[in-house]
Amino acid sequence: MADIPLGFGVAAKSTQDCRKVDPMAIVVFHQADIGEYVRHEETLT
């Protein structure tokens, strides 16, 4: 990987909780991602 961020979000759980959480649990609340810009590029002003 090239250390390029693909998106960002806010942690929903602490680091300690993330280590032992269920694989399907939510650990980050989505804020934005690179694909979001591409999907909405035509409607941005």
Image: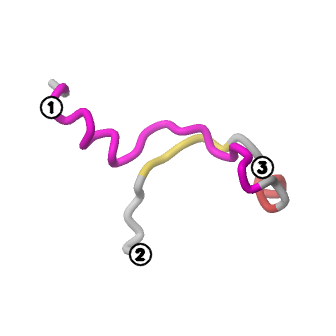
- Could you tell me which residue is drawn at 53 percent across and 39 percent down? 30
- Residue 22 relative to residue 31: left or right: right
Is residue 8 placed above or below 2 in the rendered structure? above
Is residue 42 placed above or below 8 in the rendered structure? above
Labels 2, 1: front one? 1
Instruction: Tell whether position 34 is magenta.
Output: yes
Q: For mark 1, give the secondary structure.
A: helix
Picture coordinates of residue 15, whole percent (x, y): 76, 56
Which residue is identified by label 2? Answer: 1
- Residue 9 relative to residue 3: left or right: right
Nearer-N-terminus badge (1/3)? 3
In the image, what residue type sits under mark 2?
Answer: Met
Which residue is identified by label 3? Answer: 14
What range of the chain is rendered magenta?
Answer: 23-43
The circle on residue 42 is 1
Query: Which image quarter: residue 23?
Result: bottom right
